[in-house]
Amino acid sequence: MYKTLKLGLGMLILCVVLVLAACSAKSEPAAQPAAASSGGSGTAEQPLTKVKIQLKWVPQAQFAGIYAAKEQGFFAEEGIDAEIIPGGPDIVIEQQVVNGAADVGITGVDSLLVSRDNGLPLVSLAQISQKSSYRLIAKKSAGITDPAQMKGKKVSTWFGSQQFQVLAFMEKNGLDPKKDIELVKQGFTMDQFFNDQVDVATATIYNEYHVVLESGTKESDLDVFNIEDAGVGMLEDTLIAKKEWVENNHELAVKVTRAILKGWNYAIDHQDETVDIVMNNVTEGSTTREHQVTMLEEISKLIRPEGFSEEQVGSFVDESFTRTADIALKYGLIKKAANLDEALEKSIYEEAVK
């Protein structure tokens, strides 16, 4: 009897405790999801925004800053889920961006100007490379120590919209590129140069030039002509987007630009680590770590040249843009003078580096 009463009383107390606990739980506010951090990273309340970034070529250290921005979480800090899309010989960057297959892309300034001249509503958000990467190279055995000695020689370069720096170089040095040289279409390898099918070849300082050196050719065996030093260099890699996309996603455009510029400064300051990141993204067997190390070293000098601060990475240098536009107009790359005020969305860069 006592045991039964004790058990019944205990059960009653237990029920009261459970009821009170339940009431207490109802009276307290439910736990809320963590608010988004000041860096803008996504949460359950604010998911990451997907942004597609189209490269102008296959994965390599030319785009190290973008890969570093993803690996180091700079995109995520801005609330962005970045998808990096490799380019290739059949990929037209501008069409990818205009058609919405990509939100932003990397292309050459000359190609941007041509696209705008043809009516494509594209703008630059930031200027990645500040100097021309082009060099003209000749073997010492060719006896070309001065540009004038290229007269009557076979000179190879890439076609499309990539030959105009070479043409401007010829004219700057008193040569008529239509009469005084034989212009040869250059392939994606340096075989024509190696096999003496051409006397002078075009090479970017971050890629083909070092392909030649890696083949066993010594620098002392080459005569090298710097397009930038000749004063006819055209700006190359630039970050582009569709104007309508920028107008509808102004803050997102600023965040994407900020993350990429931060990625480039990181890549330049942490090159060994960044090359590891690049190597994790290249097609297996397509390159070597040594080549990517050299590529990053060289392209870093074009993106943050001597005298540039971290805050200046991505900036628009008016003189360089004017020169590029003038060369494009002179050689018929564009039919009318470029309106650089409309082509460059300077406000995006300016807000990104505040």
Image: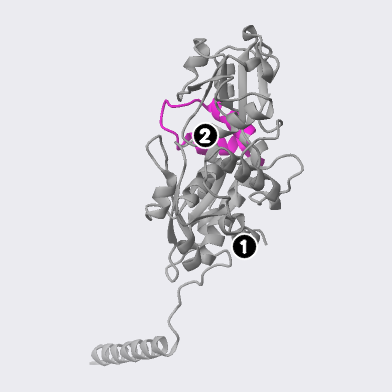
- Quadrant the C terminus occupies: bottom right
Helix, strand or loop at disc 2?
A: loop
Residue nearer the viewer, 105 or 164:
164
- Specify the segment rendered in magenta: 269-298
Mark 2 = which residue? 162
View extreme (right): residue: 307
Instruction: Say if the magenta span includes residue 189.
Output: no
x and y percent of residue 109 in the render? 56, 45
The residue depicted at 47 percent of the width and 26 percent of the height is 287
Callout 2, which amino acid? Gln
**Residue 124 in picture, x, y percent from top left:** 55, 53
Mark 1 and mark 2 in contact? Answer it, CB < 8 Å. no
Q: Position of residue 271 (x, y in %)?
A: 62, 37
- Amino acid type for the residue under numbered disc 1: Ser
Residue at x 45% of width, y 25% of height: 188
Q: Is residue 65 visible?
A: no
Count of numbered circles on the image: 2
Where is residue 239? Give x, y as percent. 54, 50
Q: Which mark is residue 347?
A: 1
**Above-or-below relation of 177 to 305:** above
Q: Nearer the viewer, residue 23 or 168?
A: 168
Is residue 278 shown in magenta? yes
